[in-house]
Amino acid sequence: MGYAVEVEGLVKVFGSVRALDGVTFRVGEGEIYGLIGPNGAGKTTTLRIIATLIRPTAGTARVFGMDVVRDAARVREVISYLPEEAGAYKYLTGWEYLMFMASLSAPDKAAAREMVEEAAEISGLGDRLRDKIKTYSKGMKRRLLVARALMTRPKLAILDEPTSGLDVLHAIHVRRVIKEYSRRYGMTVLLSSHNMLEVEYLCDRVAFIDRGRILAEGRPSELMERYDAENLEEVFEAVCGRREGV
């Protein structure tokens, strides 16, 4: 199995803050990999570097062998990135927004429409796709944006808190779609989440990060055994709680 993501010694400094301090991990092709940690741990910074949005201070990150700095344009062709705080064009309808986004990557109008029809199914928004996005609730916007991220069937989907703001039923639906797309299309997924139930259900492997460093990595079952824990919440407490004084 080859690697979809290879991160080696990643460092990122913002002024006097060392957000990442030598982060290293690898994600296999077709794997769902979770990056887990408390607020401010370095998760989003890591994802943004891999998504080519910011440059590292030191270290390297490669996506399917392509360097995210030197080969940024090529990397963007094979990824889809969903930020935790993502927006959409509020004066467009949901359908218009999806058509616009699909047109940026589809070879023709027919292919774009096919993408949007798939996105409509993912979102579950039905007739509400005819309404302007400014009328959507937070959860509806999130479902629209998740659909936008997955409709292109990227080789690598980078998802920062994919079910943030969703109710229980819609969160379950989105998790099932993510897992299905990974299995059916061989899509690699790199995600962050504060929901340990979600992480346990979705992820083949997880890494716990805090203060810019990877503290533990492995399959959920391996980590629970290693830390004598009944679930990933207890692993989180064991790994990150000690550093936070919990």
Image: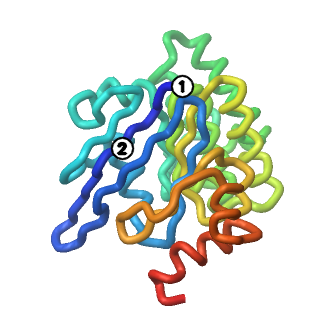
Residue positioned 52% across, 27% down in the render: 155
Tell me where residue 73 sits by quadrant: top left
* Res 75 → quadrant: top left
Q: How is the image coloured?
A: rainbow
Residue 104's label in the rendered image is none
In the image, 69 versus 234, the foreground residue is: 234
Q: Nearer the viewer, residue 172 or 12?
A: 12
For mark 1, what is the residue? 1
Image coords of residue 176 (percent x, y): 77, 42
Task: Report the residue that reaches farthest toward the right.
Answer: 169
The image shows residue 246, relative to residue 74, as above or below, that is below
Which of the marked residues, 1 or 2, is nearer the chain's N terminus?
A: 1
Circle 1: element type: loop
Tally the numbered discs: 2
Q: On the picture, is 68 further left or further right than 172?
A: left
Q: Amino acid at mark 1?
A: Met
Q: Amino acid at mark 2?
A: Val
Local crowd size for mark 2, using a 10 Å CA cut-off: few (<14), some (14–19), many (≥20): many
Q: Is residue 59 above or below residue 78?
A: below
Could you tell whether 215 is left or right of 145 in the image?
Answer: left
Question: The N terminus lies in which quarter of the figure?
Answer: top right
Q: Could you tell me if residue 96 is visible in this image?
A: no
Location of residue 60 in the rendering, given as x and y in whole percent from the top left corner:
27, 42
**Location of residue 166 by image quarter:** bottom right
Above or below — where is 241 with respect to 9?
Answer: below
Inter-mark Cα distance, 1 to 2? 17 Å
Task: Say if residue 239 shows up in the picture.
Answer: yes
Q: Which residue is mark 2?
A: 7
Along the viewing direction, whichever of 84 and 94 lies nearer the viewer:
84
* Residue shown at 25% from the left, 68% from the top: 18
**Label 1: how many residues lie within 10 Å, few (<14), some (14-19) or many (20+)?**
few
